[in-house]
Image (cartoon, rainbow, N blue to C red):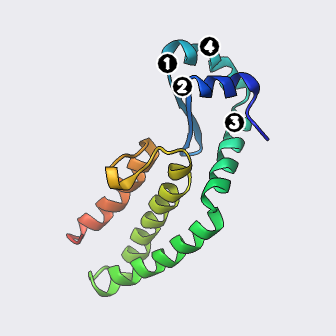
Amino acid sequence: MSLPWPIEEAVKNGLYLEVAGGNLRYRGPKGLVIQVLPLLKAHKSEILAYLRRAANEQTGAEEVSEAVRESVGERAAILEYEAGFSRDEADQTAEYCRDFYTHLFGPGKANNCCYAPADRYCEEGRRLRDRYYEAVKRRGWN
């Protein structure tokens, strides 16, 4: 599956597409966005499916999800036994961690919109990062 031809051309000319919170986000030169907006609306479900599939193919989603799953279990144990979180708090915070890392190493990496070493995040990546960090900070533990 590929993007409809006019949308592929628009991407080559500076249109940026991403999936954020299940929604299609786009940005680019104003004239270009205005020109392709009707196509984006008409083909939204196809574009979302394409972007999700591309993200999974580019990141080896199964490998990433296994690594994230292991990391979440370890994070919950550390929060509970080292930081004094209750079991429920540790599990919830670890789930926030999972959501953040799944995005960071999945769509964030595939779409090149999130890069943690440079503190660069798309809107969804920033929202997930902040939710995770705030949960840890509430308990006064970094």
In terms of sequence position, does the residue under pointer 3 or pointer 1 come before the other? 1
Image coordinates of residue 2 in percent, x first then y, are 76, 37
Residue receiving disc 2: 14
Inspect the image, locate mark 3, and give the three-letter code of the amino acid beneath it: Ile
In terms of sequence position, does the residue under pointer 1 or pointer 4 come before the other? 1
Whether pointer 2 and pointer 1 mark residues with C-beta atoms closer than 8 Å, the reply is yes
Image coordinates of residue 125 in percent, x first then y, are 43, 49
Whether pointer 3 and pointer 1 mark residues with C-beta atoms closer than 8 Å, the reply is no
Inspect the image, locate mark 4, and give the three-letter code of the amino acid beneath it: Gln
Q: Is residue 133 left or right of residue 42?
A: left
**Residue sitting at 53 percent across and 12 percent down?**
31
Q: Closer to us: mark 2 or mark 1?
A: 2
Q: Is residue 47 left or right of residue 122?
A: right
Residue receiving disc 1: 29
In terms of sequence position, does the residue under pointer 2 or pointer 1 come before the other? 2
Whether pointer 1 and pointer 4 mark residues with C-beta atoms closer than 8 Å, the reply is no
Residue receiving disc 4: 35
Q: CA distance from mark 3 to mark 2?
A: 16 Å
Image coordinates of residue 136 in percent, x first then y, are 29, 67
Secondary structure, mark 3, is helix
